Every structure is written in structure tokens, then in C-alpha cells.
Amino acid sequence: MGGERILQKSFIGQNYHSIGSLLPTPDSRPKFCQLYIYDTENEISNRSTTFGRPSSDSTLTSTSYDLQIIEFLKVMLDSNNALVKSYRMVRDTLYENPCANLKLRLIGKREQDGRTYNLPTSSEVAALVVGDFCDSIEKRDIVVQTSSGFLQRISELHPSYLALQYPLLFPYGDDGYRVDILHRGITSSSNSKRPTCTMREFFAYRIQDRDQSFSLILNAKRLFQQFLVDGYTMIESERLFFIRNQQKILRCESYENLRNQQALGSIDISNVGQRVILPSSFTGGARYMMQNYLDAMSLCKWFGYPNFFITFTCNPKWPELQRFLKDTPLHPEDRPDILCRLFKIKLDAFIKDLRENEIFGKVQAVVYTIEFQKRGLPHSHICLFMHAKCKLPTVEDIDPIISAEIPNIDDDPELYSLVKEFMIHGPCGAENLNCPCMVDGKCSKNFPKQFYDHTSVD
């Protein structure tokens, strides 16, 4: 019912995770973690008003939220969540001494492994300190002041990082990722090259389906999508942090652009380029994209122009996906992990058919890229370089492969239904002026088109 952490998004698209003070500023309503401390006598109403818009007379215009559900979740979190218990401890202390200068220390280092021992208690995850801190505070701890008036950045490596943002996904306040999580079967005395778990391995483990076990995260629908985006930004933040600390090893001062600026007599080259150079191994970076582009262009230089341009799209009505979600209240868009996994399996099988089974002829090279639509469905653009004997120069070679005809409903009813559902454009034009393809009263795809009896090659 409102995470203790605030998720903000800056104008450059980077996620920032911050936490506020224990008490709200004067003349402002409590929100996030402050709901557990401030004005708890009216906590249910305070939580319900966060979902609606107050009118001019400070009353909600409409609300459809069941107060009993809010009350049930409040009691459940009070009874089981260690982080909520720590905030309730702050509430009780402020009730006894309203003028006390309190600070809540969210402990960032665990003495015991949460996978081996019981779930953490409030004394293990937080400590309430009256007055000033001593010098023994760990640098990774989060210190929440009574009323600071500003937001504090939270480290992605804090074990309570995820539980603070998603209290309903982690109802017990259990730990998220930590830097000292050991791999299974490895102890602190084991001689292993990399004994600890990486952040990517941690999230890959948490989003896996397992037999005979219910995953709250995988059934959270929209919240699961936010969790995936949050996890992705955490992993990318750690990768960028590592690269930022490895600039000397990358020898960034030897890059050609900087040398040219020095050769031209520029004394101050601090404004040339970026201060942090991303290597070509960083997925999605500028040098990564340029390197893959040059690799694709080298194929054209060696094999000539590609002969086929194929678009392979993801279909949310695939029978495998429908069978997987048959007995669940989930929709395909609620499980983007399964969508992407199934799409990659089918794409690999299709590439294998093209290369090994030679369904279009002998293939010399294949290059493809995967893109994502706005609704989260992936699709792939494939360029196929054929052997010189299979370059399809005539109409007779093209007709058995490419067909723009509607199949006969009696001869092939299954193929007819697929073409009718997925490959028919429109209706547009005068029959449907609101069709997305309509521009200035005409179809931007030039439909309807004339029928031709024979294929022509221009």
C-alpha cells in the first residue's frame, strides 16, 4: 500500500530511487513511508485518498477501493513485514516523545544469510537512534531523518532496496540482492574464482517458474512489468558503475578523436566527447551498435546484396502461450518473460530451417536484429544472403516462395483463417476513415490495390 521508497524518472530516461524523511513537511499530506508513522489514527482514510483526486471541498469525487482490503493489508504487513515493524517502532517512540530527534538506520549488511536462517526481524534490518550517530555507521546503511525536507538516494546494493519499493511483492520484508550472496554449494572458505552471485543471476533466479510453487512476483501483472524494468535499470547501473571505475584499463586517453584534438593545438579537451567511454562490449552502447552495423555491412561486401528481407513477429495467440496461461487470470502481456523466451525459441528454430533445412535454398549468411513494439511484443528483421545458384532471378523461382493470394477455404481452411486474421489490410478508405493508415483521406499504403494474375519483377 505505497512503498517506502520513491521511484522517480528524470528527463534523460534514467531511474532514480530516493527515500524521504520520516515525517511530512508542514501543510503537506503523508505519503509512502510516512503513512506508517504520521496520523496513523486515520491511516485507512489517508491511504484511500492517495488513489483519488480531491475536489474543491477536499472530498473525493469518486472512489472504488474497498476499505476492508486496505485494512486487511495493513494488518498483514504489521504482523509480518520487518520493515513495517521498524517504522511502527518510530511511530511509538514519537508518540511517547514528540520532540525527540530520531533517525532510522536501515542496516545494509547482514550477519546471517537469509536463505539459510529465518526471515529477518525488525532489529536485524533497522535500528532507531536518538540524537547523533557514532562513527561506526556503515557507508551502505540508509539513514532516514525525522524531517529533512529533501530526498536521499538509495544504493541498489542495499538488501532492503526491493522490499522498500514493493512491500506487497515482499510481504515479509525479505532481503533482495546483496553483494555477498554465495552460490549454492560454495562456502566462504571455498577456493572459487567467482563465489558470489551477480545481480543478473539474482533476478534471473527470481523470475523463473518452478513446479509446485506459487510466485507472487510472476502473478503481479503490471507490477511485475515495473519490477522487470526496475531490475533491468539496477543491473545496468551496476554495469555502468563498473565501467566508470575501469577507464584507466580501457586506455581512454588513446582514442583517436582526443589525439586529433591535441594535435590541432587544443589545450582543454575536457569538453570533447564524454568523460566515460563505453566499450563495444556494453550492450546498447554507441560503439556496440556501430560494431554490429559494420559487421553486417561487411557481409554485404563479401556476399553481395541480401536476397530476402523477412520479418518474424511474435504472436500472443501462439498455442504454446495460450496453453501456458489457460488456467490463470493472466494475459500474454502480463508475462513478458515467457513471451520473449518463446519468441527466441521459435526464432532460433526458424533460422535453423533457413540455414540447415534450406527451405528457400542454400544460404551463405544470415543477419538479424530484434526490436520491441510499444506493447512489448518483439519482432525480428532478417536479411538472408543466398548462394549464387539460389538468388531467385526469375518469376518461376519467386512464386513458390512468396504468395499474395488468399488461400482457398476448402483446400486449406487453416491457412485461410490465418491469412484472414493476420494478413488482411483494412478495411480503410471510405468504409473506415478512422483507420490508422489513413492520411489526408487516403490510405498511406495505397490500398486497395489492383489484382494481378502474374508476378512481375522490376
Image (cartoon, rainbow, N blue to C red):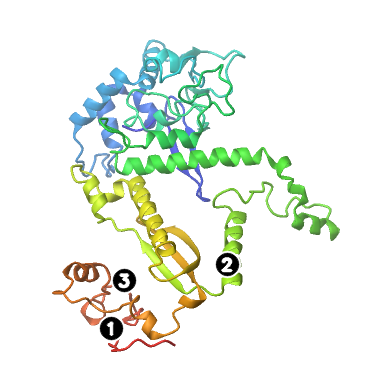
Residue under circle 1? 448
Among numbered discs 2 and 3, the one appearing first in the sequence: 2
Find residue 433 and name its label. Answer: none
Q: What x and y, as percent, mark residue 426?
A: 26, 75
The answer to which of marks 1 and 3 sits earlier in the sequence is: 3
**Disc 2 residue type (three-letter):** Leu
* Residue 28 seen in render: no
**Few, some or many residues within 10 Å of mark 3 (<14, 14–19, 20+):** few
User: At 42% from the left edge and 44% from the top edge, which residue is drawn?
Assistant: 229
Q: Position of residue 172 (x, y in %)?
A: 34, 22
The percent coordinates of residue 450 (x first, y second) are 29, 88
Closer to the eye: label 1 or 2: 2
Residue at image coords 57%, 19%: 138
Quarter assignment of residue 208:
top left
Residue at image point 40% right, 42% down: 228
Q: Secondary structure at mark 3?
A: loop
Type of amino acid under label 1: Pro
Dot 1 or dot 2, earlier in sequence? 2
Q: Secondary structure at mark 1?
A: loop
Which image quarter is the C terminus in?
bottom left
Distance between the alpha carbons at the discs numbered 1 and 2:
37 Å
Label 2 crowding class (10 Å Cα cut-off): few <14, some 14-19, many 20+? Answer: some
Quadrant into which the N terminus falls: top left
**Residue underneath mark 2:** 299
State how far apart marks 1 and 3 are (Cα).
15 Å
Asked whether 41 or 162 is in front, the reply is 162
Query: Which residue is more in the foreground, 84 or 259?
Result: 259
